[in-house]
Image (cartoon, grey):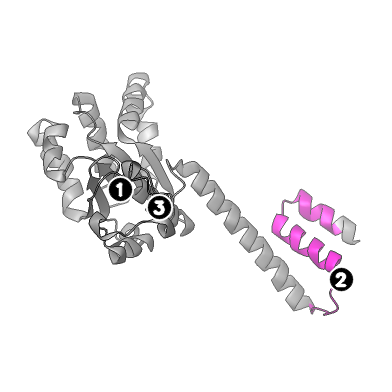
Amino acid sequence: MNTNTLDKMRRMRLLGMHRAFKTSLETKSETTATVDEMVAMLIESEWDDRYNRNIERVMRNARFRYKATIEQLDYNAERAIDKNQVHRLADGEFIRKKEDLLITGSTGTGKSFLASAIGHQCCQLGFKVLYTNATRLFAQLKMAKADGSAIKELMKIEKYDLLILDDFGIQPLDSQSRAVLMDIMEDRHGKHSTIITSQLPVKQWYDVIGEKTVADAILDRIVHQSQRIELKGESLRRKGNKKTGEHNE
């Protein structure tokens, strides 16, 4: 009977229950669980299994640039990172408030690593996160406009609780990229959160976006409801920070 039950659990993909029940049979514990306790144990095991698999799926779909965690961050004074601010961001409250986060700093100061770490933590909290290079995303959406699939792609992006746009401002935006960025920010404004990393200070984003009217409209949707982190110090790659493994953009 137990073999049959295990087989049905497996075929119904009750993998957490299957693992817990099989373990209980194999250990042959002398402690006899009541029916209520056994049911509770099986349900709890199934719940945990599904939760963990969902987190793994969310993390995989996020496509992070780096496998970064909050615990790996370097809070050296010269970097000017407010540890309390990072921990507040890591609890996901800024996503619940629909706030944005702007991370700026020179090349190699750890912007992408920090964004990845915050995004990783938000995945653990159950938020849907997408990590993408800004230039690559603009190029993909320009091609989508050409073949008529842009609206569909923008709707996919809009559904993410947190969008991380990495390396914004590497090159000035052309008219199509400006339109794409405007579409993204218009869809997300007041609904979902966005993290933008850039080597350029925010005051120079006007020049990168170009066309003052559009730049005003875009930055109005970003700047006034955002938190900011400006990373300082020398490049972590040059510094060779092996202690934390944090050596990224």
Q: Which residue is drawn at 19% across and 47% down?
A: 221
* Mark 2 or 3, closer to the camera: 3
Tell me the quarter of the image containing the N terminus: bottom right
Three-letter residue code for mark 3? Ala
Mark 1, Cα crowd under 10 Å, few <14 / some 14-19 / many 20+, is many
Tell me which secondary structure the magenta stretch mostly adopts.
helix
Q: Which residue is drawn at 79% across and 63% down?
A: 23
Question: Residue 118 versus residue 176: which sits nearer the camera?
Answer: 118
Mark 1 near mark 2, Cβ–Cβ under 8 Å? no
Three-letter residue code for mark 2? Lys
Mark 2, Cα crowd under 10 Å, few <14 / some 14-19 / many 20+, is few
* 33 lies above or below 99: below
**Residue receiving disc 3:** 117
Residue 123 in the image, given as x and y percentages of width and height: 46, 54
Quadrant of the rendered image containing residue 133: top left
Sequence-wise first label, 1 or 2: 2
Residue 28 horizontal side relative to residue 125, left or right: right
Sequence-wise first label, 1 or 3: 3
Residue 139 horizontal side relative to residue 179, left or right: right
